[in-house]
Image (cartoon, coloured by chain):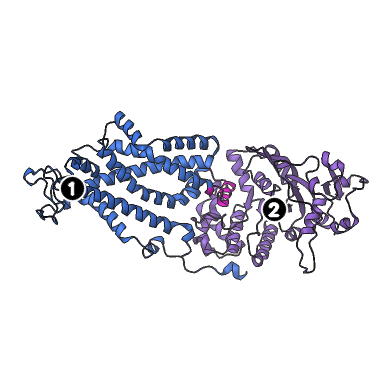
Chain colours: A blue, B purple
Amino acid sequence: MTADATDLPQGTRPSLLMRLPGRDFPWISVTILVGVLLLAFIGPWVSPWQPQALDLRSAFNPPVWVEGGSWAHPLGTDNLGRDILSRIIAGTRISVIVAFWAIVLSGALGTLIGMIAGYFGGWADIVIMRLVDIQLSIPPLALALILAAVLDPGLQTVVIVIVVTYWSWYARIVRGEILSLREREYVALARIAGCGPVTIFTRHLAPNIVNTLLVLATLQVGQVIIFEASLSFLGLGIQTPQISWGVMLADARGYITNAWWAITMPGIAIMLTCLASNLFGDWLRDVLDPRRKQL
Amino acid sequence: MLLEAQDLKKHFETRKGVVKAVDGVSFALEPGKTFALVGESGCGKSTLAKLMLLLERPTSGSVRFRGREVSSLRGRALRQFRREVQAVFQDPYSSLNPRLRVGKIIAEPMLAQGDLSRAEIRKRVEEALEVVGLPTTAARLYPHEFSGGQRQRIAVARALAVRPEVVILDEPTSALDVSIRAQILNLLSDVQDEFGLSYLIIAHDLALVEHFSDATGVMYLGNMVEQGPTEAVFGAPAHPYTQALLASAPRPDPDHVLPTDVIIGEIGSAMNVPSGCPFHPRCPQRTAQCETVQPERHVSAPGAWARCHLLHGPAPRPASLRPDQLERTST
């Protein structure tokens, strides 16, 4: 036949993993996120002290770079002489567990609901979107107060509150994506081929919203960590013998004038993790943007 | 008759009113033949194609396949119909899912039918690729690795692989480079002969339609205004709209000046279709009758008809008609 018919491209593009580094890759953010993840798993083995170990003789030890500090407690100790570094390391576990479950559950629920609203439209869409509007009009902390009063405070409650708050995020964005995807000709052609709604969802719609979900989830990490800390700080989340960054803030609040490090150190941990996940999410959004896919 | 529309209507309810996208259209596609639908944007051609593909359910009227009503089919019976009627769309970039390999794209209709073994499907994919002039190795690649013309070949291969009776072509070449268009049209012609396919083609390009189709229907605001064998419709257009459409087509002649007085104003709104003949506000030959009475079909040539009062016996000579218009519009 003709040149057009036979000139096939020889090489294929390098895989996504190969293309990722290099383009303004956020090394610092990724290092912090990987570090947090790693500490969540191996924390008990690398932490210098037992996070719960009391030592009242060394209460309020300052960090090592402040006069009176020592390498025994690099980030200092709190009012009960507990090692702050060890407690921050122990807190990563709660943060990672909360972030993981909250994001997976709210993402799955919101995505499913958003897909139904976007694909079927009509009444399903109207009802779901009004629910989303209602959800968005309720302040998350007010909702948390109600839920925490009904349920027992704790890890589960934190996850439930976050899922109830964030599903609408996913539902709204996924609905928008599906609304545009469903008008693509290949979706109409799939129907002409005889595919049912389930096949169209799983083969044509879901794979094309993965990028969006990935970015959304990454950006949500920071928010979830702050949310957990806020709830725990208010006493509605993780309760004291368990350790989370929010619990540490709450515990150290009373001594902020004479032991600033006890509240500052977990605060910095929260800030760095959120900043890292947001910067990484921004970068991911730029890289996965189809308009930048010419490379 | 293979595929037929009978008094097909599709009205969309919107907040502002009812849009009569297709308003009582009938036509029939004969086995092995090509029927072309022409008309300007917004005349309802694409909605009509969606109705024939059972992507939309008609408001009233019927779609018949081999004489059997199909527009209300569901489930298994609908899937059976899907095997017989396939489609190729306009935009080869939007019609192939970027995340599927070409082999999977072509296999999709067969997978949905679910009655062929994997080996059989692979064999048919390879055959289909060969028919459209692509190497069988193309099956392992992704759509973005192909040019627009190659992608359209893939779309054709996919439509052919289930061995349908009818292929509905919705502007199959208008998104392609001019140099590629002829190749795709030749390919479509070749496979039509080889497999005895029937085509329903929707097109803007009148030269393409004249060359490619056996019968032509001209649509205006959801109505079929003229229909018949392509030679009759193109050779002796009877409806003023068809005349205007043909006169407005560009010609490969630098001295040719497009006439500006064969049609007045812009296409009307399908939400507020004019009374009487829907074309009357734009028709330079309109009479008082056109504003109130919807014209019947009048035979204009053997096997052809047009909905125009001018064809009804000795038409009353319209006041607004100037002789020079008549001359120009009849070319």
Q: Nearer the viewer, residue B46 or B29?
A: B46
- Within-10-Å neighbours for mark 1: few <14, some 14–19, many 20+: some
The quarter of the displayed image where residue B128 is located? bottom right
| Residue B64, position as x, y percentages in the image | 70, 41
Left or right of residue B81, residue A14 in this image: left
Name the residue tied to disc 2.
Answer: B202
Q: Which of the numbered marks, if any, corresponds to residue A125?
A: none
> Which region of the structure is painted magenta?
A180-196
| Residue A121, position as x, y percentages in the image | 54, 39
Q: Chain of mark 1?
A: A
| Residue B325, position as x, y percentages in the image | 87, 56
Q: Nearer the viewer, mark 1 or mark 2?
A: 1
Amino acid type at image mark 1: Trp
Amino acid type at image mark 2: Ile
Q: Is residue A154 visible?
A: yes
| Residue A233, position as x, y percentages in the image | 25, 39
What residue is drawn where x is 24% and y is 38%?
A: A238
Where B92 sits versus A256, above or below?
below
Name the residue tied to disc 1.
Answer: A260
**Tag 1, which secondary structure?**
helix
